[in-house]
Amino acid sequence: MNLHKEMLYTAKDGTLVLLRYPLEKDSMQLMSVINELIDEHAPIGANKKVNRKQEEEYVRNAIKEIKEKKRIQFLAEIDKKIVANIGINRLYGKSAHVGELGIFIKKLYRDKGIGEFMIRQALKYAHKEGIKIVKLSVFANNNRAIHLYKKLGFKKVGLLKDALKDKGRYFDEIIMVKYLGF
């Protein structure tokens, strides 16, 4: 997928989903989505709301890193509304063949196959870009995500006890990895 190409996907419920690269104009929508996820205490790493300036900077940096082949990132859009985001950030130096995956999906759009499709596409492009290993971390109690990651070939390689904190409670973090081939 080049920077100007878009991809269509039909979700399990028949909804048409547009998968595309982020644009600078997306910052307000992305800010709204991430802040909504923070409010619902979604099992994501972020725990503080972002403001417009922070999100604009994030999007500009993401676009720059995509062009520099340091990041793979797609947004999922339904009816011109951003509903999901996935990124694989390439590590650097001696770990430049490793990428770290992160994904979020708005609550109303989960369990429709959107996440699976996005991960499959991101892994395909990561492999094309020379990423050999993709790692991720997930809340140990996020069974839905763990099931999907296992289905897609990720293997558990570690557990960090009490590594994540949300609403004053500590949670274990599972580290998972998928080898894309050498």
Image (cartoon, rainbow, N blue to C red):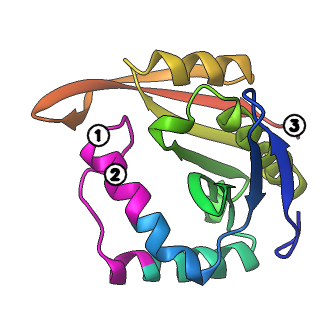
Q: Which residues are magenta?
A: 32-55
What residue did someone put label 3 on? Answer: 181
Q: Is 110 situated above or below 100? A: above
> For the residues marked 2 and 1, what is the alpha-carbon distance in whole angstroms?
6 Å
**Quarter containing the N terminus:** bottom right
> For the residues marked 1 and 3, what is the alpha-carbon distance in whole angstroms?
37 Å
Q: Is 126 situated above or below 61? A: above
What residue did someone put label 1 on? Answer: 40
Q: Is 110 situated above or below 150? A: below
Residue flagged by tag 2: what amino acid is it? Glu
User: Any magenta on residue 28?
Assistant: no
Q: Residues within 10 Å of mark 2 (few under 14, many from 20)?
A: some
Quadrant of the rendered image containing residue 14: top right
Q: Position of residue 85 (x, y in %)?
A: 58, 53
* Residue occupying the far left of the picture: 168
User: 55 left or right of 112?
Assistant: left
Q: Secondary structure at mark 2?
A: helix
Residue 85 numbered tag? none
What residue did someone put label 2 on? Answer: 36
Question: Are discs 1 and 3 less than 8 Å apart at CB?
Answer: no
